[in-house]
Amino acid sequence: MADLDGKVIIIGGASRNLGGLLARTVGARGAKVVVHHNSDSSAAQAKDTAAAVREAGGESLVHQADLTAVAGVEGLFAAARERFGAPYAAVNTAGMVLKKPVTEVTEDEYDRMFAVNSKAAYFFLREAAKEVTDGGKIITILTSLLAAYTGLYSVYAGSKAPVEHFTRALSKELFGRNVSVNAVAPGPMDTPFFYPAETDESVAFHKSSAMNGDLTKIEDIVPWLEFLLTDGWWANGQTIFLNGGYTTR
Ligand SMILES: NC(=O)c1ccc[n+]([C@@H]2O[C@H](COP(=O)([O-])OP(=O)(O)OC[C@H]3O[C@@H](n4cnc5c(N)ncnc54)[C@H](OP(=O)(O)O)[C@@H]3O)[C@@H](O)[C@H]2O)c1
């Protein structure tokens, strides 16, 4: 596999779960990892993740920013550049879920979901496009719900959906620089992000919809991210559904 030793990798939402495991994984391969978090409540986990990156042989920088503000996104990339130089890759895992019938979604909820899932992702892509080195990698995280015929996730899946197009458009614009830009769409993942929106019955249904009767694990997603960051560079402009067959497209 291509080398990540000394490569600067910015990870949006890296304090724990998917982003946290990716940080530790690339850190163990010698990457210089920018561990981003947003909430004060995730500061300790971001610090732990950054420490784990260093213990594994990489370097790390913790940076807090609300990525729904463009200045927050710009500040994240500026901090990375100042500390480590130009990034090789940027992966945005920031997201927010809402499960509700359309008739119950408020204006505030709609605006918040689109701010986190669409706007933050758009400007993360914009800054990544400006900052990553030629031959670099950019990855966004969507949801396998984009291939599902289902209600209740209108604003969650609906605010992730534009990011597929943003990702494809940027991949085309970066032709000539050999920067691969892709989206990964996991199935329902076994992290604390997933459960508050669900009931015991719906969790059982989600589990029954994959080939092994279980949820998607972050350990099943991170190797694909690692591959896209290295030898998988020929994938470009794609949305890769990773879900044990939960949905297909
Ligand atoms: N778990 C699932 O079932 C599932 C399935 C498919 C796709 N996904 C997607 O996978 C990604 C990672 O999810 P996860 O399960 O690993 O949960 P997670 O750790 O809770 O990831 C969500 C991240 O979004 C960040 N975030 C929220 N609001 C933000 C803001 N305003 N600015 C910047 N960052 C913000 C959070 O940071 P703070 O906590 O610091 O605010 C957190 O790191 C998300 O994009 C999610 O939509 C999840």
Image (spheres, rainbow, N blue to C red):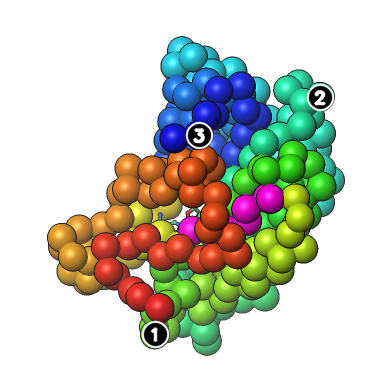
User: Badge 1 is on which residue?
Assistant: 149
User: Badge 2 is on which residue?
Assistant: 82
Up-down: is 84 above or below 11? above
Q: Main secondary structure of the magenta part?
A: strand
Is residue 231 or residue 62 the one in the foreground? 231
Mark closest to the chain's N terminus, 1 or 3: 3
Q: CA distance from mark 2 to mark 3?
A: 25 Å
Image location of residue 24, percent across then percent down: 45, 28
Image location of residue 181, percent across then percent down: 63, 56
Which is in the foreground here, disc 1 or disc 3?
3
- Range of residues picked out in magenta: 178-184
Q: Amino acid at mark 1?
A: Tyr
Horizontal relation, residue 154 to residue 87: left or right: left
User: Badge 3 is on which residue?
Assistant: 2
**Element carrying mark 3:** loop
Q: Amino acid at mark 2?
A: Glu
Residue 46 seen from this side: no
Horizontal relation, residue 26 to residue 139: left or right: left
Q: Amino acid at mark 3?
A: Ala
Q: Quadrant of the N terminus?
A: top left
Q: Residues within 10 Å of mark 3 (few under 14, many from 20)?
A: few
Q: Residue at x 32, y 48 (%)?
A: 220
Q: CA distance from mark 1 to mark 2?
A: 45 Å
Q: Residues within 10 Å of mark 2 (few under 14, many from 20)?
A: few
On whether residue 183 falls in the magenta region, the answer is: yes
Image location of residue 187, percent across then percent down: 36, 62
Residue 83 seen from this side: yes
